Amino acid sequence: MKPLGPIPEGYAARDGVLAIDGAKITDIIAQSGGQTPLFVYSSNRLRARVSQLRAAMPERLAIHYAMKANPFRPLLRLMNTLVDGFDIASGGELGMALAAGVDPARISFAGPGKRDMELQAAILQGVTLNLESEGEAERALSVAERIGKTPRLAIRVNPDFGLAGSGMKMGGGAKPFGIDAERVPALARRLVEAGAEWRGFHIFAGSQALNADAIIDTQAQTIALAARLAQEAGVGLPHCNLGGGMGIPYFPGDTPVDAARVGEALARQFDHLPDVLVDTHFCMELGRYLVGEAGVYLTRIVDRKESHGEIFLVVDGGMHHQLAASGNFGTVVRRNYPVAIASRFDAEVAEEASVVGCLCTPLDRLAEKGGFPQAQVGDIVAVFCAGAYGASASPSAFLGQGPAAEVLV
């Protein structure tokens, strides 16, 4: 048998069935129209994660939600009451954030390839633009002059370092993201001289790291780089986005990042800031760490079959909703996510089986040769850690299957 990823703490059985916030998943499905597949997001777990993070981090640090992880509107409305700011990466996400009631003054907009209409929408709303190139900076200044609005501009810095152990490196070396560090001071001066509202730096070195030492080291390098660039620019630094970095366990052998250690080290950094950063407002931008473990993907077994001695549990969902769980979202070697038979959640392992989706491609596997209770047609499979990069980051239109339903409980 191939091991399954670790189910996040706090999920338990009620009458033998997986319960989320005290409600059995069979009841949640029934109350949501009886249809699967279904993403279920736990409001209790979202509140608890933000509360735990605030307790671990220095009070000075603001918490921003990177909404690319999950833009479901009810979830955005809840997060709007829990975090200090939102980070977006498109004009579409700007519209979603505004529709969820987010104050545009609390939004920052990063990402390469912003179109002029996106720049204009952000400037009109008073959103902070994290500029990714000198060309984008000039376009933003031109748009602002044309519409007669002072833009709020920051620079996304491509640092000289990456985040060690990061699942996705966003800095160090040639990157489409941000402006190479040595070119930042001149651009900062240009923005100030042009009359923009100068907002500071966004420095994002990587994401999905579980090693606290690597995150601590990266944050120390980030603060040192911010201080050096601010001194060279001579324009001060009102705001510094330290990026994210903190990941969640997905695979066998993964362990949670020690947030308390990260927070303690950051507090020591804040206690000894260089003069140029004494008045700087710092934030940390997190997506999957805030919402990933709060989500569960539920899909129903529609067929049970045997082929060459192997058992296949065929479900009505699949990679078109959970691309990452299928191993097709950046992983080199496919490993199993945390997956369980939710309708037999406290039953003993009885067989080796693969959970496969309804798409006609061999890539559509949610669990490969995992150990499960003996499951039958009608049973519900749960894929955990489904709160981030699931519904919105998977090819739901593939083969005309369409999106899964979503609910916040």
Image (cartoon, rainbow, N blue to C red):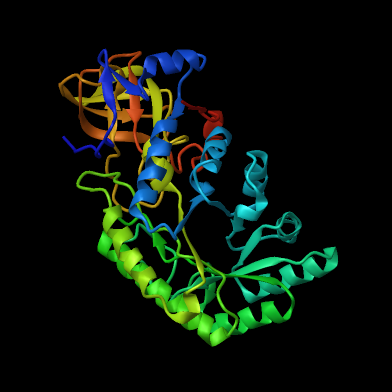
* Badge count: 0
Q: Nearer the viewer, residue 299 or 134?
A: 134
Residue at point 35%, 21% (across, down): 22
Residue 124: image quadrant is: bottom right
Q: Can residue 324 be seen in this view?
A: no
Compared across the picture, whether 89 is left or right of 99 comes to left
Residue at point 62%, 79% (across, down): 188
Residue 332 vertical placement versus 172 (above, below): above
Q: Is residue 49 visible?
A: yes
Q: Nearer the viewer, residue 131 or 43?
A: 43
Residue 182 percent location from the top left of the image: 51, 84
Compared across the picture, whether 14 is left or right of 287 comes to left
Compared across the picture, whether 350 is left or right of 200 comes to left
Residue 402 percent location from the top left of the image: 55, 29
Compared across the picture, whether 189 is left or right of 41 comes to right
Residue 359 percent location from the top left of the image: 44, 30
Residue at point 32%, 53% (across, down): 332
Residue 254 percent location from the top left of the image: 23, 48
Residue at point 35%, 69% (across, down): 218
Quadrant (top left, top right, bottom left, bottom right) of the N terminus: top left
Residue 342: image quadrant is: top left
